Image (spheres, rainbow, N blue to C red):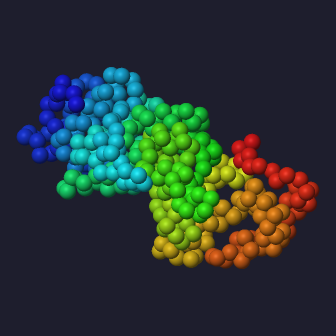
Amino acid sequence: MKKSLAYSIPLLFTAACSDPAPKEGNSACLFQPTEKILQPYYEFLSKNDKVISGGNFCSFSPELYQRVWDKIQEAEETGLPPAASLPQSFYKIEKDQIQITVTASEAHEIYAAHLAHSLWREKNKMFPWSLTEYTQDQLEDLLQPKAWFNSWDEQKKEYSFRHLLDYSPKETFQIANENVSSFSDQKAAMIDIIKSVRSFRHGIAFSYDGEGNPNDDHDPQEIATMQTMHEEKISRHGCQTMSPYIVQLANVLNIPGETIRGYYFGANHRSALFEFTDQVLAHGDDVYGGNTPSSELMDSYKFWEKEVLSYPKGDPTAAHNSMIHEYKMAIKYPGWGIFYGYCRKGGMGWLMKAFIFEKFGPFAAMDELKDLEARIQDITKNCTTEIPLDHPDQ
């Protein structure tokens, strides 16, 4: 940590030894730094009370506070995203270990790097959107520890990551930058993120030998870093890793989102919610395969807010509503699985079982299925040709 930074008085603590000029709201906890390089950040925060509240900046310890400004100075001096070190516990993970704990120092460095990255991008106007566009709740999703950590307890000094480790914004931004080319607005960027994961597959957790005995010939199940998941193109724990992976890629572009589980299919599946862009990835596993274009893969947040999230987790009505968009897209853009089911598993009977006699009720009317059947027969020449592969974005 750099020791050269100097401040007239601590920037984020009202418990300092002198009284500043009166201010209103949360900006009352701001004090002007002496470092010129940090002056624009002070000015931005002092004018945006909801950003201070959203990030809960006024609660920071002196040590965490210092780390944030060290990381900002690092970015300003190098012109590169702030970085953080891989936690030591990650080097000691055991087989199938999905969660790691980190020290307070490691947690603070990781958190400080992410906060510094968000503010650095904002101050230098690197995106055509701004933190000031978001509500305080959205800023909390973007800036508070829950955005990256599975648990964060400053009093007990307990910090952990589960399934996916996003420890360095420098690493995560490199992944996002390679895959996002549409920066007209946040929604367009989200569509590019979805496109970037369509070639991923669900991890294989179990494998067996020729005699049916379990063996280790399956995908790794340990917690993975963002870079590892990017390179493998495997979501080791399905929706439990894919949903946060997408949220982290959005987060590093200053687009707020969150994950939630217990609504899709009324079970323990994980979804990704993006209120600002009015998008929901109903099930993290929706990205694998299928013919639905990436621009139409996600459901509407407004619909989910009214028809899904207003019910208790596990409620059958919420479960049904969480799946409506997926079924509509399957009819509109039938993929390999639909063709295979119809041509190899039972024709119209299979379609009726899949779309009408489903666990949570019907998702299509008979006239829709008859139209789908006609399209399948036309494309496959009455199931006499090879089943077409999925090409969602061609």
Q: Position of residue 69 (x, y in %)?
A: 26, 33
The residue at the point 60 percent across, 70 percent down is 321
Q: Position of residue 344 (x, y in %)?
A: 81, 64
- Rendering quarter of residue 116: top left
Query: Is residue 200 in view?
Result: yes
The residue at the point 57 percent across, 36 percent down is 179
Quadrant including the C terminus: top right
Q: Position of residue 230 (x, y in %)?
A: 52, 40
Quadrant including the N terminus: top left
Spot the residue most to the front.
Answer: 211
Q: How many marks?
A: 0
Left/right placement of residue 150 relative to residue 70 reads right
The residue at the point 64 percent across, 76 percent down is 359
The residue at the point 48 percent across, 64 percent down is 261
Spot the residue most to the left.
Answer: 17
Q: Position of residue 78 (x, y in %)?
A: 36, 22
The one of 331 and 276 positioned closer to us in this rendering: 331
Can you say whether 212 is above or below 174 in the image?
below
- Rendering quarter of residue 107: top left
Query: Is residue 27 in view?
Result: no
- Rendering quarter of residue 264: bottom right
Can you say whether 55 is above or below 334 in the image?
above
